[in-house]
Image (spheres, rainbow, N blue to C red):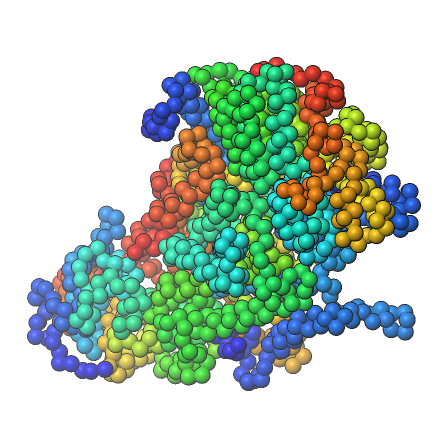
């Protein structure tokens, strides 16, 4: 992981020259978190899951086998969320149907295994390749379409795929999916610790790769695209290339997670797990709540969003008005909780936490809040919002988007733009860059 | 216990409640081998992935001795490998796919922990439909039928049997269609049926049954309607569809009033007393499964899976849905419930003014078939 | 950067038809129509090596459209653009930048989510997906030195939103310079600037020219431009109405008509 | 247009006996006319919100569900009859639209992406709520009018005739409202330019609220109709939502006329696909059309014409 401050980190962290090269607190926190995840299965590995002290107090550590499996499942979901974040959080091309890529990866690998007996280790790369190809299929139109129109394409793509699956249900198993293919390396239900570590290793690998990419110059270009494509082109960078790259990378990573997932006891090549609208929505919620455009936030959000319903599932409390136990309405509760959270902190949990931590820290150091006031950058959500607004405005012919943008950009003078009418005539033509 | 939406789906509720009733009876009677029986119900949401996760919760986490339930074939197939891996006895009460038994037959040692207490597997369901037509088409006046089958895993063997054998019954097959899973608008399908001139739509429907029958009735389509229609088996279905189900015919394991065995009516009455409604077929099967399990466990004096497997293979248990025996390991339908007259032989019933009247087999019949007045 | 002999001088002004080698940037018979509206009408001119060309016209004359056609924001309806002897008509924006022609935006397009120095650094990123050029070390230093060059050395860590108007203009120039251009198109730099600021920016542009850059400066207002530019092209209604030294332009009757004696 | 479709149908059905062919064709025409009118009602609500507010309301399908279950409760559970159910469904869905706007959208108006996400999650919450309360089994809503008449070899349900007539009455009323009343013109003005509308004294808040109420009512109406000739169930709003996208993209954003034309194209396309080709293509075809239009001609087949519509 590089520790540069360009790109998204800049918005998250106050880059104070005083901290110098020492490891910032958030990295320490992140590494501790990873270390904790790494040792989670150790107690159950040793067969010591609880200790009774003085014959009275029982301390339980570690997780049961079933809980290990659940966390393993959560790792895969976190990988989905991270893959969404690469393209949507960073470049601002909001995908409403990322399940498309998970399913391409998962179904390809599963079908190769089920139909042709290809070993999972060989089938998974094929799944990744097909998913990456799917990334090209969606990414190239994305070069022409903006804002809600792109989102419509992404929203509809998984539904087309699902319709095809239903139409050819003999091959694809229809609405309810295929049965489970072979497990990767034969690691099945009998070995939950290994299932856990396979998932954890892949999680860490994907996290590392995506952090590396997004913290490299490519990441800086991604966020610049989110902010202003024309400015990126004016810097001599081809936005189309980087956007397509982001889509393909995202699709490949999502496809990889999907392909490996189906070869574990916690995953199935089935629409409800890979392709359903619900999956795509949960991924968006996870990434936004965790903190869009940070990768780490998406990972944390993914873990929480996956495990929350699992937790709700164990709650036996019966909701009075609905007369239904919590365990049966977990998804309803999840949707309502998500709705509230999205409303309260659209910037994300991670961002909110970092901001609170930072404020505390600077208070303690006796620095004024002003030290941080200089970095009131816009969140990715705000940036994407801005792009959408211009796309919608252009579509609806509400005049040049530039006007709004410059108003936001605190332009001081009120002169009229030269040639605006000519531009406008062009821009009213549609939402696309036809040229 | 794996049941879809046990608090609001009648099929799932019947599994959960039927088993609960059996467990209560067992415990009142001293449990199994003196030990109290505990029951744990998990919701599959009719979703293979969820079902699998819940199965793991039951077996990995709670370490149960036997699992039962599972309505959806796709859910069952998705847990078959886990059943093999966990080596825990599973007695299916709802899912009909013969692929499960095919796996037992092909790879006995691995999959022998799976038994299907009911319903009869999907090939036998198809056979049952053929047998019904063969016996009753004259009485019903069905000279030609349009076969409408929903496109799910469980209906594939049904379609295969119907394609193969329905033509031999002397009834003309005017049209045969597997329509898409999730179909909501049956207008186009019914137009085709009308154009084909069939006397009746001969159906196999579970997930898509309600819109199908409601649209048939409300649009007063000029053909009769019957076959295997799972929701129609539900005793409260007349109410749920506002009477649209009237004149519809379906196969069923039992009805609350039918004396399939001595145990049928008492069970249905007890169930109604306890839970305020009558069970659907999964309730009878789950109830039978728990009792059969208990009697075998008592007999072999063990709850070790391998002992139970051999015990069940030998067992002949008369429950509420018939006399339950299983095909042997060498049969193509290994560990499926035996479909045979005198053992498990489902009934056919028709909704008549809010009542489920048995019309076949004749010895159990409570009423004659009625043709819808608009046909 | 080489200093070639002035080839365009031989051709002389007012001659019809330009060749690819008549200047660093040559525009020939450029026309751009939007639907029924002709924004640029058969326009031809050349920008010579190491000059500062003023590209002048009243509001709505088609200056920005010409600019946008040249820099690849949209392709011309017809006509040809040569850059350093090569036909670059219709090339996309980033390709133009990579071949050495950078631009600034009239309405200023900073990246609001990052600091001044990071805004400049984006211009230093190579147009490759996988690049080891980190943005910290050397890149950061180069970006900082460019910032100093354009007069933002003391404001590296501010965000664009905190910059005054003149600062945003300097930032635009800094980002353009980061792409290491041979030629710079500067779109309406002086609007909204105070007198001293105009002086200061003009000084900067002149220094850049002295360092070897060729500049084309667009403005609808000649006042600030006169002392800066070497030569001017004046357009109205998308067509060229005059070309020559600033003093000639000022006296040109057609130019005066176009401006109704106002803005000159 | 009708003629072209007939020709296509005839080609598709060639070889069938003449009588069946003829009944097949009249079948397609009758069903296409009716279902398309219903789709138009759904799509107009969707396009109004997009046109006026500049946001995509992904809870539009949920409004359909809300309307259908509102009708179900009044007509079936409280036993007040089909027509009372119709009124209740429309009112409940309109109230749902108003509540959505007032509680959520109003504060997010300038953030189309958040609106899209929030409405999507709202739709999920509504679906899950209905699923929890009513279960997954579909419910029958009584037909508004019973009975069947045989027309040109096709059984024509009186219920569907009512659906058709009411749908068209609503479409025409809306068209007149938008074009010939001050309130309607305010709507158009707001859709053209919020700033401009504010300048001439139009309160865009109120116009937006009105739009959400109208859209909710239209969706509720469609929900009751769908429930009465199919069934009502928790996920019933999904397919109409996707159809609305398709129709709106096809017909151009914010255009009532465009929506009607788009609805008829999609409706007939769907009916022809199911009758002539394969019923299982029913869901796929509109999706593919949507993708093609988005990729090839994203401004819609007819461009934007809210200005004069």
Q: Quadrant of residue A67?
A: bottom right
Q: How many marks?
A: 0
Determine whether A287 is above or below D165 in the image.
below
Residue drawn at (70%, 43%), measured in percent from left and top? B328
Residue C175 shows in this picture = no
Left or right: residue B287 compared with residue A28: right
Q: Quadrant of residue C234?
A: bottom left
Q: Position of residue D210 (x, y in %)?
A: 53, 39
Q: Position of residue C131 (x, y in %)?
A: 40, 75
Determine whether A278 is above or below B338 in the image.
below
Residue drawn at (51%, 31%), measured in percent from left and top? B177
For the residue pair A189 and D35, the one nearer the viewer reads as A189
For the residue pair A341 and A120, the one nearer the viewer reads as A120
Residue D277 shows in this picture = yes
Residue drawn at (70%, 31%), measured in percent from left and top? B340
For the residue pair B347 and B274, the one nearer the viewer reads as B347
Determine whether A142 is above or below D20 in the image.
below
Left or right: residue A387 compared with residue B161: left
Left or right: residue A200 compared with residue D42: right
Q: Position of residue A255 (x, y in %)?
A: 50, 60
């Amino acid at each position: 992981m590089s520790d540069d401050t360009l790109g998204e980190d800049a918005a998250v962290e106050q880059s104070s020259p005083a901290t110098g090269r020492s490891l910032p607190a958030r990295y320490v926190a992140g590494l501790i978190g990873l270390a904790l995840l790494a040792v989670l299965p150790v107690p159950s590995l040793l067969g010591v899951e609880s200790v009774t002290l003085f014959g009275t107090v029982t301390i339980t550590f570690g997780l049961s086998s079933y809980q290990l499996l659940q966390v393993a499942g959560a790792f895969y979901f976190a990988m989905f969320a991270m893959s969404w974040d690469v393209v949507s959080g960073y470049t601002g091309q909001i995908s409403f149907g990322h399940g498309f890529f998970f399913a391409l990866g998962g179904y390809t690998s599963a079908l190769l295994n089920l139909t042709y007996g290809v070993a999972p280790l060989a089938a998974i790369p094929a799944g990744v390749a097909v998913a990456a190809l799917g990334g090209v299929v969606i990414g190239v139109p994305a070069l022409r379409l903006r804002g809600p129109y792109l989102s419509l394409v992404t929203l509809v793509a998984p539904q087309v795929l699902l319709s095809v699956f239903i139409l050819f249900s003999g091959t694809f198993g229809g609405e309810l999916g295929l049965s489970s293919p072979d497990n990767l390396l034969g690691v099945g239900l009998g070995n939950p610790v290994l299932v856990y570590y396979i998932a954890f290793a892949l999680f860490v690998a994907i996290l590392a790769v995506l952090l590396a990419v997004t913290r490299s110059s490519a990441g800086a270009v991604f966020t610049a695209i989110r902010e202003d494509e024309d400015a990126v082109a004016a810097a001599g960078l081809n936005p189309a290339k980087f956007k397509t790259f982001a889509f393909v990378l995202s699709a490949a990573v999502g496809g990889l997670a999907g392909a490996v997932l189906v070869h574990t006891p916690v995953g199935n090549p089935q629409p409800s797990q890979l392709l359903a609208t619900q999956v795509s929505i949960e991924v968006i919620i996870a990434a936004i709540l965790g903190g869009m455009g940070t990768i780490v936030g998406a990972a944390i959000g993914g873990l929480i969003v996956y495990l929350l319903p699992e937790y709700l599932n164990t709650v036996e409390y019966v909701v009075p008005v609905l007369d239904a136990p919590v365990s049966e309405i977990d998804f309803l509760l999840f949707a309502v909780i998500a709705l509230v959270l999205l409303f309260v902190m659209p910037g994300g949990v991670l961002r909110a936490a970092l901001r609170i931590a930072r404020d505390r820290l600077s208070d303690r150091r006796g620095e004024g809040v002003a030290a941080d006031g200089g970095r009131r950058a816009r969140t990715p959500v705000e940036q994407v919002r801005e792009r959408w607004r211009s796309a919608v405005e252009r579509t609806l012919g509400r005049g040049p988007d530039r006007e709004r943008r410059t108003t936001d950009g605190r332009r001081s003078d009120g002169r009229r733009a030269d040639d605006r009418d000519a531009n406008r005539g062009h821009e009213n033509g549609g939402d696309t860059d036809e040229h | 216990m794996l049941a879809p939406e046990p608090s609001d789906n009648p099929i799932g509720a019947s599994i959960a409640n039927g088993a609960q009733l059996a467990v209560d009876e067992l415990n009142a009677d001293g449990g199994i081998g003196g030990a109290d029986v505990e029951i744990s119900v998990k919701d599959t949401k009719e979703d293979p992935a969820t079902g699998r996760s819940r199965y793991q919760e039951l077996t990995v986490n709670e370490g149960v001795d036997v699992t039962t339930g599972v309505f959806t074939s796709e859910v069952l197939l998705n847990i078959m490998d886990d059943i093999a891996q966990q080596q825990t006895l599973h007695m299916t009460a709802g899912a009909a796919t013969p692929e499960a038994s095919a796996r037992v037959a092909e790879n006995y040692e691995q999959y022998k922990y799976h038994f299907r207490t009911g319903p009869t597997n999907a090939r036998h369901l198809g056979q049952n439909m053929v047998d019904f037509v063969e016996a009753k088409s004259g009485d019903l006046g069905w000279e030609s039928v349009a076969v409408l089958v929903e496109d799910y895993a469980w209906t594939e063997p049904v379609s295969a049997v119907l394609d193969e054998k329905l033509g031999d019954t002397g009834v003309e097959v005017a049209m045969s269609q597997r329509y898409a899973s999730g179909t909501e608008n049956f207008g186009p399908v019914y137009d085709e049926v009308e154009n084909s001139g069939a006397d009746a739509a001969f159906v196999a429907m579970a997930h898509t049954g309600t819109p199908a029958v409601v649209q048939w009735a409300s649009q007063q389509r000029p053909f009769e309607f019957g076959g295997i229609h799972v929701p129609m088996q539900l005793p409260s279905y007349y109410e749920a569809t506002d009477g649209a189900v009237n004149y519809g015919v379906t196969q069923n394991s039992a009805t609350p009033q039918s004396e399939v065995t001595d145990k049928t009516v008492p069970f249905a009455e007890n169930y109604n007393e306890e839970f305020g409604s009558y069970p659907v077929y999964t309730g009878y099967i789950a109830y039978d499964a728990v009792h059969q399990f208990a009697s075998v466990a008592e007999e072999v004096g063990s709850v070790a899976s391998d002992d139970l497997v051999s015990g069940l293979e030998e067992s002949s248990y008369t429950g509420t849905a018939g006399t339950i025996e299983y095909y042997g390991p060498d049969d193509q339908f290994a560990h499926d419930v035996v479909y045979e007259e005198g053992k498990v032989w489902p009934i056919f019933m028709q909704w008549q003014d809010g009542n489920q009247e048995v019309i076949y087999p004749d010895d159990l019949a409570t009423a004659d078939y009625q043709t819808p007045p608009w046909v | 950067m080489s200093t070639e002999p002035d080839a365009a001088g031989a051709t002389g002004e007012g001659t019809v038809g330009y060749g690819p080698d008549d200047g660093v940037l040559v525009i020939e018979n450029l026309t751009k129509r939007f639907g029924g509206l002709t924004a640029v009408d058969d326009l031809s001119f050349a920008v010579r090596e190491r000059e500062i060309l003023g590209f002048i016209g009243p509001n709505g004359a088609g200056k920005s459209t010409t600019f946008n056609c040249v820099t690849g924001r949209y392709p011309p309806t017809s006509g040809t653009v040569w850059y350093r002897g090569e036909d670059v008509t219709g090339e996309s924006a980033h390709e133009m930048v990579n071949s050495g022609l950078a631009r600034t935006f009239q309405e200023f397009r900073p990246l609001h989510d990052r600091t001044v120095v990071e805004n400049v650094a984006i211009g230093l990123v190579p147009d490759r997906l996988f690049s080891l050029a980190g943005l910290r070390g050397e890149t950061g230093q180069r970006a900082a030195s460019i910032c100093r060059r354009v007069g933002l050395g003391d404001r590296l860590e501010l965000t664009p939103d905190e910059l005054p108007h003149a600062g945003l203009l300097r930032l635009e120039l800094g980002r353009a310079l980061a792409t290491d251009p041979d030629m710079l198109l500067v779109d309406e730099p002086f609007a909204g600037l105070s007198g001293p600021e105009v002086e200061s920016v003009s000084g900067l542009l002149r220094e850049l020219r002295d360092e070897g850059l060729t500049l084309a400066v667009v403005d609808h207002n000649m006042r600030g431009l006169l002392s800066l530019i070497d030569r001017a092209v004046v357009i109205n209604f998308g067509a060229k109405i005059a070309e020559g030294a600033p003093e000639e332009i000022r006296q040109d009757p057609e130019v005066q008509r176009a401006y109704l004696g106002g803005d000159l | 247009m009708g003629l072209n479709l007939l020709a296509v149908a005839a080609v598709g059905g060639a070889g069938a006996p003449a009588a069946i062919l003829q009944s097949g064709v009249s079948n397609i025409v009758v069903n296409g006319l009716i279902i398309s009118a219903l789709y138009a009602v759904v799509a107009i609500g969707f396009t109004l919100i997009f046109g006026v507010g500049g946001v995509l309301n992904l809870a539009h399908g949920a409004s359909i569900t809300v309307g259908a279950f509102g009708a179900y409760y009044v007509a079936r559970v409280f036993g007040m009859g089909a027509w009372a159910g119709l009124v209740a469904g429309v009112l409940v869905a309109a109230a749902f639209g108003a509540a959505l706007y007032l509680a959520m959208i109003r504060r997010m108006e300038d953030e189309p992406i958040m609106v899209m996400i929030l409405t999507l999650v709202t739709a999920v919450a509504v679906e899950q709520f209905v699923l929890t309360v009513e279960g997954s089994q579909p419910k029958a809503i009584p037909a508004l009018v019973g009975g069947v008449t045989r027309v040109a070899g096709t059984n024509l349900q009186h219920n569907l005739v009512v659906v058709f007539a009411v749908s068209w009455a609503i479409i025409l009323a809306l068209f007149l409202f938008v074009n010939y009343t001050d309130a309607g013109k305010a709507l158009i003005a707001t859709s053209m330019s919020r700033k401009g509308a504010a300048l001439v004294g139009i309160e865009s808040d109120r116009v937006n609220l009105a739009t959400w109420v109208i859209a909710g009512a239209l969706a509720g109406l469609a929900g009751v109709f769908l429930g009465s000739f199919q069934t009502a169930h928790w996920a019933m709003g999904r397919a109409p939502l996707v159809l609305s996208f398709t129709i709106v993209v096809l017909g151009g954003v914010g255009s009532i006329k465009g929506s009607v034309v788009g609805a008829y194209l999609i409706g007939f396309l769907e009916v022809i696909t199911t009758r002539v080709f394969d019923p299982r293509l029913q869901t796929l075809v509109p999706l593919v059309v949507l993708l093609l239009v988005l990729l090839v001609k994203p401004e819609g087949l007819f461009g934007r014409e809210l200005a004069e519509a």
